[in-house]
Image (spheres, rainbow, N blue to C red):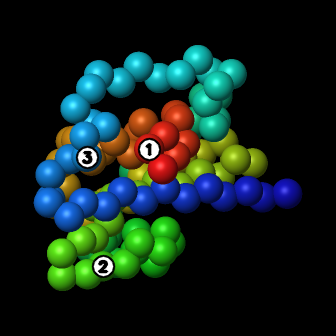
Amino acid sequence: MLLVFLSGCETTTMRPPQVDTVRFTPLAPEKRVLAEPKVKFLVRTDGFEYCARITGIPVTPTSRPMACAFWNVRRKECTIVTPITTGYNYLGHELRHCFEGAFHD
C-alpha cells in the first residue's frame, strides 16, 4: 500500500508563521511520521501553483502556499517543494513537516 501525506504552508502576510519563531528539536524517531526520512528538495518555477494543486490551498491575491512537503511512506521519503526564490525559514519549516507531519494543522 502506498500512502502519501501532504502538507502545505500558506501565509497572508508573507511573513513566517508564529510556529516558526521557536527553536525546533525533532521528535524522537519512534514518534515521527518517518523515523529517518530521506529528504529531497524540489525547486519549481511554478512552486506556488504546484503546492496549491497538491495541497488544495488556493493561490489568491492575498494568500498562497509558500512551500509544501509530501511524504512517501513506503519509500521513506519526504519531498520539499518551493518556488525558485524562497527563504531558509520556509525550508526549515517544511523540513520540520518531514519529521513531525502536520504539526500546526
Based on the displayed image, in which of its 4 quarters is residue 38 positioned?
top right
Q: Camera-side residue: 54 or 72?
A: 54
Residue hosting label 3: 17
Ranked by sequence position, the earlier of labels 1 and 2 is 2
Q: Secondary structure at mark 3?
A: loop
CA–CA distance in space, label 1 to label 3: 10 Å
* Rendered view: 89 above or below 71: above
Q: Secondary structure at mark 2?
A: loop
Q: Secondary structure at mark 1?
A: loop
Label 1 crowding class (10 Å Cα cut-off): few <14, some 14-19, many 20+?
Answer: few
Q: Mark 3 belongs to which amino acid?
A: Pro
Q: Mark 1 belongs to which amino acid?
A: His
Residue 104's disc is 1
Left or right relative to 16: residue 99: right
Q: Which circle, 1 or 2, is nearer the viewer?
A: 1
Q: Is residue 44 visible?
A: no
Q: How many marks?
A: 3
Residue at 30% x, 79% y is 59
Residue 5's disc is none
CA–CA distance in space, label 2 to label 3: 17 Å
Q: Is residue 65 visible?
A: yes
Do residues under tags 1 and 3 come within 8 Å of each other at their CB atoms? yes
Label 3 crowding class (10 Å Cα cut-off): few <14, some 14-19, many 20+?
Answer: some
Residue hosting label 2: 59
Left or right relative to 56: residue 85: left
